[in-house]
Amino acid sequence: MELHVALEGRGDRADRIYRALRDAVLDGRLRPGERVPPTRELAA
């Protein structure tokens, strides 16, 4: 799964990552059992 998180925007980086993951679940891009990118990759 490829996840795009804007580096600029409202809230801190953790909030933006949370919203991106939540949105991916809600619109079906992230399915049950699918692995998410590692923390270090998300934080980069």
Image: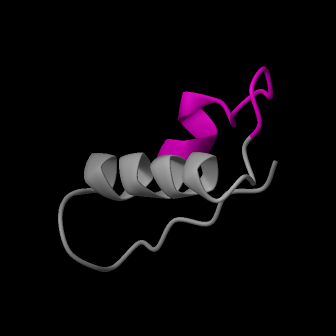
The answer to whether residue 44 shows anywhere in this view is no
Residue 42: name its quadrant: top right
User: Considering depth in this image, is 21 or 31 the residue closer to the camera?
Assistant: 31
Name the side, left or right, on which 6 lies relative to 28: left
- The colour mode here is one colour
Query: Looking at the image, which residue is at 75% across and 54% down?
Result: 29
Name the side, left or right, on which 10 lies relative to 37: left
Taken as a whole, is the magenta stretch helix, strand or loop? loop
Query: How far across and down, in percent of the image, does residue 16 sit?
Result: 35, 59
Image vertical order of residue 32 relative to residue 31, above or below: above
Range drawn in magenta: 31-44
Image vertical order of residue 14 relative to residue 34, above or below: below
Query: Looking at the image, which residue is at 17% across and 64% down?
Result: 11
Query: How far across and down, in percent of the image, does residue 9 sit?
Result: 28, 79
Farthest residue in the bottom direction? 9
User: Considering depth in this image, is 28 or 6 the residue closer to the camera?
Assistant: 28
Image vertical order of residue 7 relative to residue 28, above or below: below
User: Considering depth in this image, is 8 or 26 the residue closer to the camera?
Assistant: 26
The answer to whether residue 33 shows anywhere in this view is yes
Query: Looking at the image, which residue is at 48% across and 45% down?
Result: 43
Examine the structure image and report whether residue 41 is included in the region drawn in magenta. yes
Name the side, left or right, on which 27 lies relative to 31: left
